[in-house]
Amino acid sequence: MKRNLRGAFASVMILALSTLSCVGTPDPRMAPTALPGGSVYAQSDPLPLAPELTKKVLPNGLTYYVRRNGNPGGRAVMFLIVNSGSTNERGDQAGYAHFVEHMAFNGTTSFPENELVNYLRSIGMDFGAEINAHTTREETLYTLQMPLNDPSFFDTGLKVLREWATEVSFDPVEVEKEKGVIIEEQRLGLGPDETARVREIQGLLAGEGLKAFYREHYRPDRMAVIVVGDIDVRSVSEKIEREFSFASVDGTVAARPSFPVQPTTDLGFVASFDGNFERAIITYRKIVPYIPETAIGDYSTLLKLRVAAEAIRLRLSDISRSGHALWRDAYFDDDYFYGRTRLYSFTLTASDGRELEAFGGLASEVERLRRFGFTDSEFRRTVDLYRRWLGTLDVEDDDLKSFSFAEEYVRNFMYGEPVPGVVNERVYIKDTLDALTLDALNEAGRTILAEDEGFVAVRAKAGGGSGLLTETAFEAVLRAARTAVLSPVENAGDEGGLFDSLPEPGTVVSQEKLPNNVVKLALSNGATVLLKQTSYDKDAIGFMAWSPGGYSALPVEDQTAASFAPSLMSAAGLGTMSATRVDELTASLNAGLQWSIGEKGEILVGKTTTKDFESFLRLVYLTSAEPGRDSRAFYAARDHLAEQIGPYVRDPGYRFEAAWSSNLFDGNPRASSLDVAAVKGMDFERTRDMVISALADASGFTYVIVGDFDLETARDFVARHLGAIPSGSKGEPRWVEPLKTREGGGRVDFPLSQQKRASVRMVWSAPAVWSWRREATLGLMAPALNNRLLDALREDLGGTYVVSTKASFSRFPVEQYSLIVQFDTDPQRVDEMIAQVRSEVATLAAGTFNPVYVSQIRTAAQRDYDGGTRTNDFWVKNLGNALANGLDLEVLGRAKETLGFADTKVFKALATELLGEDRLFVYTMMPE
C-alpha cells in the first residue's frame, strides 16, 4: 500500500478539475480589484464568460463549446453530452438510458455493427481510455480523444458525434447480442439474488422501445457538443454548425426537463441489515438549495465554502490518523444533486455493534466545528493547499489538460456552473485567499454545517430487529451532541521546520556526459545520479530512484512489514516532525513522493517543480535516512489497517486471487494470503530499522532526475541532500525463496463465489530466458490479443462485459513470464468462454492471428512513441526500467526498435515458445 507523503495532494488535484457552485452574496463594500491588463472588477460585477471559449446555442437548441488548448498537442477532446439519464426512464423503461449508450457503439448509419470501434482502433485509439461513455441519473456522456495527425480523423470524429446524436441503428441482432453484455456488466455489481431480476428486466427490452426512448430524449435542445484541443476555433465552430443544425423529431425547441429535489429540514432515515455485510457504513447527508452564481462575489463566496469543505476533510483525516477516532474511516464530500440542489455528505465505516458510537463521534465533531471552528493549523494548511493549486493554473504554458476544460464545460451545460476563464479565476482566487481570515472560514464552515437536519442511511449486519439502530436512536445521538460539553481542538506545538538540523552534505566526485543529454554524477556516498534537462513541461521535474533487492531479498516473515511499511511509516512523520506537522510544512509545496519495497527492488518516485526542487530532495533525504518517530501514530495506523484487512481477506474475490496465486507458485509462502495477525504483529522499531536499511543505502541507489532545472543548481542540491544519505552496506541482493511458477499446467476450480457469477483466470506462465526484445514483444502481443478477445467474447458471444489481458516478463529475481487473461461470466458458459480463448490464443502460434489487431497495436505504439518521447514521464520510466534490468541507457533507440515487434511473424515466434498448452493454468471461481 503506497501513500503519498503529501497526504492532501490528491484532493487538491481533484479540486483543480472541479469548480462547484453554491449560494453567494456579493459584498458591495469590497473595493474594486485589478484584473489582467489593468482593468478592475467589483464583487457585484457579473461573472464573465471565458474570453478564450466560444459558446453558442444553435436555432435548434443545441449548445456547442469550442476552445483551443495545446495539451496534449496533436489531439482533440470531443464530447457529446445529452441531458438524459436514468431519471428520464418510466417504470417500464428500466435500464433504457444505459442500453441506448451501449447501442451507440453497436451500429450507426456509417459504422454498422462493431465497425466504429474497429475504425477508432485502426487509427491508434485505445477503447476505454480514449473512446468511452457513461450514463448517470441525469446525463449520458460520450467522449473521444481524437488524434489530429490526419485532418480526416477530426472530421470523422465529428461525424461519429453526430451519428450518436441522431443515427444509432438499433439493429435487432445487435440489440439481442448486447443484452448479454449488459447482463454481464450488471452481474459484476449485484448480490446473489439480483442477477435474475436484471435478466428479467433485460428480457423486456426491445429494439423498438429503445428507439422510442432514443427519439424522445436525444433532442438537440438537450445536447451539447464540446471540442477542446489543438485546433482552429473558427474552422471547428463552422463544422459543428454545419453538422449539428438538424431539427428535433417534432421540429420544436423545448425546455430541458428538471427534477427538483426539496432541501431537507427534518431528519430522514433508512436502514438495510444483512448478515453478509462485512462492515457497517453510515452516511449522514443534507440537501441544500442551489442558487446559480451570477456575480463575482458569488464565486468568492463559493470558494470560501470549498476551502471550508477541505478543512472539514482535514479535521476528519487528522482524527482518523490520531488513533482516537470512534469510527474506522470518515469522509466528507459535496456535490451537485439533480442540478438544482447540493448534497453535503459524511460517510463513516464502523465496527460491528459500534455504529451508534461512531455516529456519535461524528455528531460531536460536527458540533465542535460549529461552536469553535477550525484551528490555526487547519486554516493555514487548507489555504496553502489552495495556493498550491492556484500555482498549477498556468494556462499560458498549456499546463492544463484539454480533458479538464471539456469536463468543466459539461458542468456548465448541466448545472450552469460559471466559466469565467482561468486567467480571471486566478485573480478571483488569489484575492479571495489573500482576504480570507480564520473567522471567515469558520463562518463558511457553519454555513455548511447548519443545524437543519439531513438524513441518515445505515448499512449494517444487524440492529433493526434488536431495536438499536433506529431513527429514534440516531435522533437521540444528534440531540445529545447538540448539548454535550465539548472543548476546542488544541493546536499542536511547533515541532520545527523542514530544513532544521541539516546533515553534513556530500560532494560530487565525478561528472560524465552520456548520450541523450544525460549527465551522470557520482557522489561521495557512492550514489549515482542521472540528470536530464528538458523543456517539455515548464517548471516540471520528474524523479525516481532504484536499488535492487526488495522483499525477495528479505526473509519471508518480513514481507508483510516490507509491503505495508510505506503506509504505516508515513503516519509516523519524518525526522522529529509528526505527520500533521509534515502536512503543515508541505501543504504549499508541489512535492509528491511515493516509495515502496517491491518484489525485486526499492523504488522512490515523485514529481515536483523547479521552485520546490530543493524541498523535494530534502523530503527524499528524510524519507530515506530519517523516517519519523511517532510510534503511537504508527500503531494506530497498524491497528486500523488490520481492521480493514479482516473483511478484505474474507471477500470471495480476494480468496480466489490468493488461492490461484498460491497454486501457481506451488505453495510458496510469499504468495500466501494476507494475515491479520502478521499485520498486528508489526513492530515499530523493527519496521523503522528495515526502512533505514532499505532506503538509507545510497551506494546501492541510482537517482534519476528529469525536467526543467539548472544543471549547476541541481548539482548543488543533489550533493547537499542526496549526498547526505548514508552509504549503506547491503551489497548485491541474495534472493530468498523467490516466486517461481510451478510446472505442469492444469485446471483448478474454486467453489467460492456467493453470487451466480464465475470468474476465470487463464495464465500462461513458466521460466524463460529474458531479453528486453522478448519482454517488449510480449507487451505488444497482450493488447493485440485483448482487442481480439473483447470482440470475440463480448461482441460476438455476449458472454462477458470486459476482458483484461496483462503480460509480464521479468529478469529478476527469476527469469520468467506470464500472460493472464481474466474475465467474469455466467457459470453455465465458463467452458464455452475458456474454449474460445484457447482458440484465439492458438492462432498466435499458428501465424493465423488476424492482422487487423496487429495493425491496431502497431499504430497505437507509433502514436505513443511520437507523442511520448518528448515527455518527462517517458524518460523517467525508461531510464528506470533500464536500471532495473541492467541495460545501457540507449532508451530512445530501444523504444524505436520496439515498434517493429508489432508483427504477426514476430508474435508467432514468441507465442510458439511461450503459449503452449503445457504452460497454461486455468483457474475458475464458481458459485458455492
Image: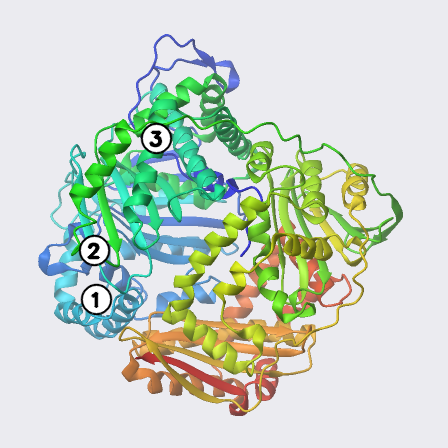
Residue contact at pointers 3 and 2, CB within 8 angstroms: no
Q: Is residue 749 above or below residue 98?
A: below
Label 3 environment density (alpha carbons within 10 Å; few <14, some 14–19, many ≥20): many
Question: Which of disc 1 and disc 2 is earlier in sequence?
Answer: 1
Kind of residue at disc 1:
Phe
Q: Residue at horizontal 56%, vertical 48%?
A: 634
**Residue 885 falls left or right of residue 63:** right
Kind of residue at disc 2:
Ser
Q: Residue at horizontal 22%, vertical 32%?
A: 479
Q: CA distance from mark 1 to mark 3?
A: 37 Å
Q: Quadrant of residue 43?
A: top left
Nearer the camera: disc 2 or disc 1: 2
Whole-percent x and y of residue 916? 54, 89
- Which residue was labeled with disc 1? 170
Whole-percent x and y of residue 314? 45, 36
Image quadrant holding the C terminus, namely bottom left
